[in-house]
Image (tube, rainbow, N blue to C red):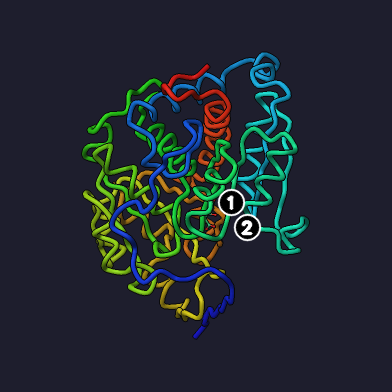
Amino acid sequence: MTTLRQSIQSSRTRPDALPASVPFASTGHPGSLLGISDLSLDQITGTLTRASLLESEDPLARAHRLAKRRIALLFYESSTRTRTSFELAAKSLGCDTTLVSSLSSSIEKGETLKDTGLTLRALGAEAIILRHPNSGAPWLLEQSTGLPVLNAGDGMHEHPSQALLDLRTILACLGLGAETAIAANTLAGVTVTITGDILHSRVARSNMLLLPRLGARVQLCGPPALLPDLAAQAGPGITIERDFDHALAQSHIVMMLRIQAERLAGLQLDLDEYRQRYQLTVERLAAHPSVAHVLHPGPIIRGLELTAEVADGPQSRILDQVRNGVAIRMALVERALTATRSGATQ
Ligand code: NCD
């Protein structure tokens, strides 16, 4: 038996249950994106449209849009895709960016989030992109600095820019163009199955809050240790199906998730059993032809939640998700620096 065991002694705590509703409300800066529910369907349409426009724009013209505006990336957790795509997005618009990560800054010396945020503001940062292990940290940072904050993942809570790039990917999978107006029935009749470590996944949570608003059915699949029964109460349009093959038989899109070993906090899993029950293989995909597209937010662990053949296969949209991240984050950075209280952009 292969056992994955990880204990973490930190300020992170495992929630006993997934909350049924969004526990934080955004009252702050109109350019912030703290949780996915902050955005109306019209604002989501606007963000997707803007992402496409910026993506197709001449790079030299685009670099004048926010020339020399200052963006700080404040990362208390490791990141490859999210950090790099936010940074490239901001630079594409002409911004100066600076990265502060917990391992090479005064955070190591005990500086609080508030003091680090105030320091970045004093250094001229006009917006902060924050990744933090504690749920709710972006709300605290916005409150204490008054700056627009983009949540790049807070603990086990939310990852709203990922949900938007996943939506852009899903719309493309369905052949819906960038100009599609997002409405309550845009994804009617579409079933998305999210499989794996739902409990620890801020990606799953933001998608669970977003996709049903567009009419999608979201099916959650995984063992009870990684998917408590209560998750089905996270909102309308969400169901649990423990049998992966049954779930796939009813799905059009499957989103695979990594087991977040760093957050398991002593929980033990039999990985051989996990692979047997939940690993996405070419055989499983072939047995369920309704599943046309495979998504994964990354990082992928080849040979665990999915096989290398699936990751590299024709149904994999994993690298499309990465590409879509840059376009979506350009729109979010622009919104952060130009949104006004009336909801308009300058
Ligand atoms: C995820 C995250 O950090 O929440 N990755 C991402 O941002 N693309 C998922 C993970 O770490 O497994």
Mark 2 Cβ and ligand 1 under 8 Å apart? yes
The residue at 40%/69% (across/down) is 15
Residue at mark 2: 77
The residue at 56%/21% (across/down) is 54
Residue 41 falls in which quadrant of the image? top left
Front residue of 111/41: it is: 111
Residue at mark 1: 131
Mark 1 Cβ and ligand 1 under 8 Å apart? yes
Tell me where residue 43 appears, x and y as whole percent.
39, 27
Q: Classify mark 2: helix, strand or loop.
A: loop
Front residue of 327/221: it is: 327
Classify 326 as above or below 115. Answer: above
Q: Amino acid at mark 1?
A: Arg
Q: Classify mark 1: helix, strand or loop.
A: strand
Residue 185 falls in which quadrant of the image? top left
- Contact between labelled residues 2 and 1, with CB atoms less than 8 Å apart: yes
Q: Is residue 243 left or right of residue 261?
A: left
User: Which residue extends farthest bottom?
Assistant: 1
Question: Which comes sooner in the sequence, label 1 or label 2?
Answer: 2
Classify 15 as above or below 99. Answer: below
Front residue of 58/310: it is: 58
Tell me where residue 231 appears, x and y as whole percent.
29, 62
Q: Amino acid at mark 2?
A: Glu
